[in-house]
Structures are given as structure tokens and as C-alpha cells.
Amino acid sequence: MMMRRDPAGLGMTSQRARDRMVEQLRTLGIQNPRVLDVMRNLSRHLFVDEGLEVRAYENSPLPIGQGQTISQPYIVARMTEHVVAANPRKVLEIGTGSGYQAAVLSYLVPQVYSVERIESLLRNARRRFRSIGIENIRTRHDDGRRGWPEEAPFDAIIVTAAGEYIDPLLAEQLAPGGVLIAPVGPQGGEQKLMRVTRDADGLHESMLEPVSFVPLLGGRI
Ligand code: SAH
């Protein structure tokens, strides 16, 4: 009897698709070779809903249930580049979602913390981390707008949902020399990716590029 070892039919297509995705990221200006390597090797198709696996290496966001999306590979790559530039040991992510962004970071940073307000998404993300063998991500089911004060300070903080502003209580959880990357702006309106750094003089904010994220919401469900 013939065995089907690759039920989703991803095999070679997947390797070609991954290479193509990385080429696209390069064209869009992603340069960090470690980030590109991690994104080539990490199986994004394990982080999307059943039936969408064949689209996993397209440069687009995809639905993950509960009205949420796994971010576009370009934006994951860009935000990751900004984070690793600070050479962090300890990173906090707000908005675990599918877990893909946290998984990418887990190969580049010793310790990742990630907070998600929707329990069912978090459960799926944890299952993915376990099945891939990732052990350096700690997760928490909570409203992450105020960060994870018990574990602060962090060398980097990455927010993957758009708020109206950057909460000062979150920025305060940055270690000296740390960097916070967050989309800011109204839903369906103009959102900008912001970068906040902390040095001896305090906090400094700069604008990076226009983006489009799902909203940062209050409470947990
Ligand atoms: N980083 C995710 C992107 C998911 S979309 C990935 O790689 O798949 C953004 C996520 O932020 C959603 O899952 C949403 O539920 C979550 N979110 C929104 N507001 C939040 C809040 N206040 N605290 C924690 N998570 C939040």
C-alpha cells in the first residue's frame, strides 16, 4: 500500500514557497540573515487554520479565528529586525495570536514572554510551541495593555495589535537600552509602527512606517 507521508501535499511546494517568501522579504528590504534564516526554516503552515496551509508562505495576513489574524510575514520580519537589533535577552510580546511571531523570536532571543487576551487562541499557540519543541516561551492569559509587571524589565517589547497610544505603564517596563515596537492608530484608519527607546535621558519615540493591525482591546475572554 502507498503511504501518504505528506497529507497536506506541502512537501517540495513548501520548500519552494519558503524560498520564494524569503526572496520577497529581501526585496522588501529585510536584511538580517538570522531573521531570514529563521523564517525560512520555521513552518508557518503550522500556525494557520486548517485548509489555509497552502497559502501559509504568501506575504499576507491570514485568519486564525476569533476575528484575529496571523500577521503578514513582511511585518513579522520587520518587527523582529527592530527587536533583535537591540540584542535582547528578554522580550515581551503583547498579542500571542497564532504564536508565530513569538516562535520566530524564540530562535533569536533566550527568553520570550507573550500575553494573549483570548484563551482559545492561546491554547492553540501553546499546543504549537509544544509540538515544535519550543521551550523558551512563557505565556499568560490576560489583558496585556499593561504588560507583565512581575517579569519586568524587558530588553524589548513588541505589541502586535494597534492601540490608540502607547501606554506609559508598558513603556516603563523597558530596561535601559531597551526598545519597544508597537503599531499605533485607529482601526481602519492611519496606523503607524512606532519605536520607543529608553536611555539615560528617558524615553524617545520615532515613527517607522505605515501598517495595518487588528485592534488592541481591553479585558480577557
Ligand atoms: N503576534 C500574532 C498576531 C496576532 S493578531 C501572531 O503572530 O499570530 C493580534 C493579537 O493580539 C490577537 O490574537 C488579539 O486577540 C491580541 N490582543 C488584542 N488586544 C490584546 C490585549 N489587550 N492583550 C493581549 N492580547 C491582545
Image (cartoon, rainbow, N blue to C red):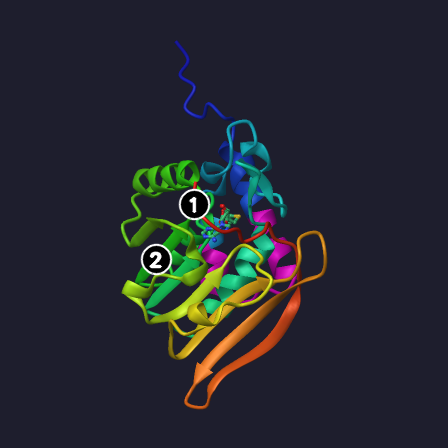
Residue range (magenta): 19-38
- Looking at mark 1, is its residue's CB closer than 8 Å to ligand 1? yes
Q: State the separation of the CA atoms marked 1 and 2.
A: 17 Å
Give the x, y percent position of residue 116.
42, 48
Which circle, 1 or 2, is nearer the viewer?
1
| Image quadrant assignment for residue 149 | bottom left
Nearest to the observer: residue 88 or residue 188? 188
Left-right relation of 95 to 189: left
Please report the residue visible at 60 percent of the width from the left and 56 percent of the height from the top.
74
Left-right relation of 88 to 216: left
SS for dot 1: loop
Give the x, y percent position of residue 166.
53, 68
SS for dot 2: strand
Q: Quadrant of the N terminus?
A: top left
Residue 29 belongs to the span the image colors magenta: yes
- Looking at mark 2, is its residue's CB closer than 8 Å to ligand 1? no
The amino acid sitting under disc 1 is: Arg
Image position of 115 with respect to 153: above or below: above
Q: Residues within 10 Å of mark 2 (few under 14, many from 20)?
A: many
| Image quadrant assignment for residue 195 | bottom right
Circle 1 residue: 220
Residue lying farthest to the front in this orientation: 219
| Image quadrant assignment for residue 182 | bottom right
State the mark number for residue 113.
2
Q: Main secondary structure of the magenta part?
A: helix
